[in-house]
Image (tube, rainbow, N blue to C red):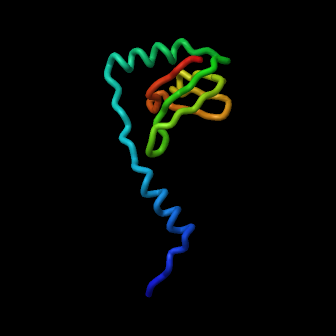
Amino acid sequence: EYIPVTDKGLQDALRLQEKIAENKVELGEDRELELNKKISSLVKGDNVTIKYYYGIEYIETSGIVKKVDEVNKNIQLLSTKIDFDDILDIEIL
């Protein structure tokens, strides 16, 4: 039995196909050390842009650092919590 696809359904299906999963980048030792230095230098109130792996792709978010949690290995911005292992780059603004 043929079930017609509505225009909206077709658009949604095409949009999903366009999103191709990115592989998570394995950082080299030098890059990892550089990133760890940046993380260690962060303090509450810093304004940052962080590029990190989320789901199937890398995204960027900017915000104010609320907390750097060395025990649980994450950075909490006002509205986002990011694991150290997912971070590709940090820019302190």
Residue at figure coordinates x 36%, y 41% from the top left: 23
**Residue at the extreme left of the image, as rendered:** 28
Q: Answer above or below: position of 41 versus 20.
A: above
* Residue 62 figure quarter: top right
Tell me if residue 67 comes above or below residue 61 in the rendering.
above
Residue visible at 57% across and 15% down?
Answer: 42
Residue drawn at 56 percent across, 25 percent down: 49
Q: Residue 51 vs residue 76: left or right?
A: left
Q: Where does the N terminus fall, quadrant-wise?
A: bottom left
User: Looking at this rendering, what residue extends furthest in the front direction?
Assistant: 7
- Residue 33 x, y percent position in the rendering: 39, 15
Viewer-side residue, 73 vs 42: 42
Q: Is residue 90 above or below residue 21?
A: above
Q: Position of residue 24 (x, y in %)?
A: 38, 37
Q: Nearer the viewer, residue 93 or 37?
A: 93
Position of 75 relative to 13 (above/below): above
Q: Residue at x 56, y 17 (%)?
A: 92
Quarter of the figure that contains the C terminus: top right
Percent x, y for residue 88?
Answer: 44, 28
Q: How many marks?
A: 0
Q: Position of residue 32 (x, y in %)?
A: 38, 20
